[in-house]
C-alpha cells in the first residue's frame, strides 16, 4: 500500500491545487449544499467523473495527503475518489458525513503513519 500513497503524493506534488468552492460557499447547482471546508481539484488530472480529481483542503498548514474518500452517488450514478489534504480527524469526520447523506454513501481510507 505504501507505493499507492507514494504515487498519490507525486500526483499532488506535480499538480496545482485549485480551490473553487471555499469553506462556507454554496454548490452552484444545489444552493442548499454548503461546503464545510475548502473544496477544489488538482489541475491536469482526471477523476472518475471525467473532471479533475477532487480535493478537500483542511486547516493543517502542510497540505499533506492524509486520507482519501471513495463516494457513490446514486442520483448521479457515479463513484469517485476525493483526496483529503491537511485535514484533522474532526475535518475528516465532517467530510465523511458530507458525502453520506441522501443518495450518497462514502468510505474513508486514512493513511497509516
Image (cartoon, rainbow, N blue to C red):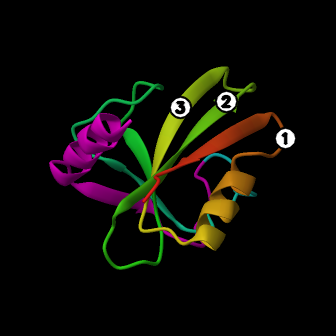
Outermost residue toward the top? 77
Secondary structure beneath dot 2 equals strand
Q: Which residues are magenta?
A: 1-28
Looking at the picture, tell me which residue is in the foreground, 33 or 39: 39
Corner quadrant of residue 11: top left
**Residue at 19% in and 53% down:** 13
Q: Which residue is mark 2?
A: 72
| Helix, strand or loop status at disc 3 | strand
Q: Residue at x 21, y 38 (%)?
A: 44
Quarter occupied by the C terminus: bottom left
**Image x and y of residue 87, in percent:** 49, 68
* Mark toward the viewer: 2 or 1: 2
- With respect to residue 66, does 36 lie above or below? below
Which residue lies under the disc numbered 1? 102
Question: Of callouts 2 and 1, which one flags the residue occurring earlier in the amino acid sequence?
Answer: 2
Which numbered mark, 3 or 1, is in the foreground of this view? Answer: 3
Where residue 83 appears, as percent x and y from the top left, is 44, 48
Q: Residue 109 vs residue 103: left or right?
A: left
Q: Residue at x 25, y 38 (%)?
A: 7
Residue 80 image label: 3
Amino acid at each position: 500500500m505504501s507505493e499507492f500513497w507514494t504515487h498519490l503524493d507525486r500526483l499532488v506534488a506535480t499538480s496545482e491545487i485549485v480551490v473553487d468552492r471555499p469553506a462556507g460557499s454554496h454548490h452552484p447547482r444545489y444552493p442548499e449544499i454548503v461546503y464545510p471546508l475548502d473544496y477544489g481539484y488538482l489541475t491536469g488530472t482526471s477523476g472518475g467523473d471525467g473532471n479533475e480529481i477532487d480535493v478537500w483542503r483542511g486547516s493543517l498548514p502542510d497540505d499533506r495527503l492524509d486520507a482519501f474518500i471513495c463516494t457513490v452517488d446514486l442520483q448521479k450514478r457515479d463513484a469517485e475518489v476525493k483526496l483529503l489534504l491537511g485535514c484533522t480527524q474532526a475535518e475528516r469526520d465532517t467530510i465523511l458525513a458530507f458525502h453520506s447523506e441522501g443518495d450518497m454513501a462514502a468510505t474513508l481510507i486514512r493513511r497509516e503513519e
